[in-house]
Image (cartoon, rainbow, N blue to C red):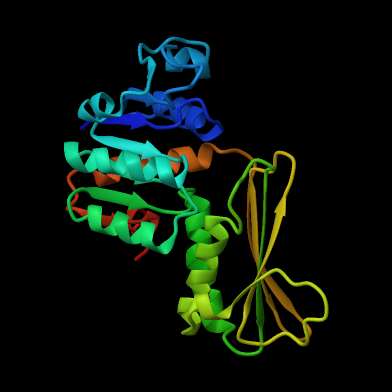
């Protein structure tokens, strides 16, 4: 079975990587490239824009036409754009893979409501390695549940607009769930001044933004006399792209609802 895929944010860093991956992935047919109405790339051949070789798919801003031709839309844009695309996907019954981060709780609830009508993949990070780390963190947190302080460090490029990253927050959620805590109540986002001693039940987050760092994440379980670190470092956006395409294939024929990469990888 061939899955017909549309890609949003075609001219962006992640959009270009998704197009490159889609053109190379067996079982995937790249049928539409979407960009903003004010994009300078409208009308250009998407393949030529990315690889220098024409693929016959022009960059467009006609979301309805694109999704009517596709089985699945892959969207790594911004929350407001993703939600607008999701509404169209609901109307035309097109599945959707969402790699966008920075959603507010009420926006996540809206995604869940729309997923009652179409299959939706929602994951803060679609790299297979990162999802393996999520599983490792669950195991480590249960083993190191007492006597270890948890700190989450993440670094990304200067252009990233949300912090902490969606991946870092998901790491915190996995650990908090394993420990029977609520991340909203125990998270500490940065420290400054005379903060007093660290409360043992907290989960700390530290964020770095600079240069062209694609994505580094490290969780430290800090005990007295030892420290356990679990890390993932991305040197390319390609793992996110190939994971998203794997998710698009997974969604075909699935019942309506919200899925994540743990479903795709059979880790639940």
> Relative to 100, is 248 on the left or the right?
left
Residue under the image location 48 percent in, 80 percent down: 182
> Relative to 152, is 143 on the left or the right?
left
Please name whichever residue, 218 or 93, is drawn nearer the observer in this view of the structure.
93
Image vertical order of residue 191 relative to residue 87, above or below: below
User: Where's residue 26, x and y in %?
Assistant: 34, 29
Residue under the image location 53 percent in, 30 percent down: 12
Image vertical order of residue 147 relative to residue 233, above or below: below
Please name whichever residue, 19 or 264, is drawn nearer the observer in this view of the structure.
19
Q: Quadrant of residue 123?
A: bottom left
Q: Quadrant of residue 72?
A: top left
Query: Can the viewer see residue 99 in this picture?
Result: no
Residue under the image location 49 percent in, 21 percent down: 39
Residue at the far front in the pictured view: 38
Please name whichever residue, 237 or 83, is drawn nearer the observer in this view of the structure.
83
User: Where's residue 195, x and y in %?
Assistant: 77, 81
Residue at the far bottom in the pictured view: 146
Image vertical order of residue 229 relative to residue 21, above or below: below
Residue at the far right in the pictured view: 194
Quadrant in the picture for the N terminus:
top left
> Relative to 185, is 34 on the left or the right?
left
User: Where's residue 190, x and y in %?
Assistant: 70, 68
Query: Can the viewer see residue 203 in this picture?
Result: yes
Quadrant in the picture for the C terminus:
bottom left
User: Where's residue 253, x and y in %?
Assistant: 17, 45
Image vertical order of residue 53 relative to residue 257, above or below: above
Q: In which quarter of the image is residue 84?
A: top left
């Amino acid at each position: 079975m061939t899955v017909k895929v549309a890609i949003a944010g075609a001219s962006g860093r992640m959009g270009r990587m998704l197009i490159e991956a889609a053109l190379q992935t067996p079982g995937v047919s790249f049928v539409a490239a979407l960009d903003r109405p004010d994009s300078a790339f409208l009308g250009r051949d998407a393949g030529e824009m990315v690889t220098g070789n024409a693929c016959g798919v022009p960059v467009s801003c006609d979301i309805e036409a694109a999704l009517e031709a596709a089985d699945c839309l892959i969207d790594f844009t911004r929350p407001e754009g993703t939600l607008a695309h999701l509404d169209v996907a609901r109307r035309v019954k097109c599945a959707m893979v969402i790699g966008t981060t920075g959603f507010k709780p009420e926006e996540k609830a809206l995604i869940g409501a729309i997923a009652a009508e179409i299959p939706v993949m929602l994951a803060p990070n679609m790299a297979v390695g990162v999802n393996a780390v999520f599983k490792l963190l669950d195991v480590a947190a249960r083993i190191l549940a007492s006597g270890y302080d948890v700190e989450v460090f993440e670094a990304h490029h200067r252009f990233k607009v949300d912090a902490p990253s969606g991946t870092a927050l998901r790491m915190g959620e996995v650990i908090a769930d394993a420990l029977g805590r609520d991340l909203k109540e125990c998270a500490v986002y940065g420290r400054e001044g005379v903060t007093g001693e660290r409360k043992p039940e907290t989960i700390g987050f530290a964020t770095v933004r600079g240069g062209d760092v694609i994505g580094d994440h490290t969780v430290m379980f800090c005990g007295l006399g030892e420290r356990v670190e679990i890390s993932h470092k991305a040197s390319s956006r390609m793992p996110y792209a190939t994971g998203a395409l794997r998710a698009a294939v997974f969604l075909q024929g699935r019942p309506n609802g919200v899925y994540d990469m743990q479903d795709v990888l059979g880790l639940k």
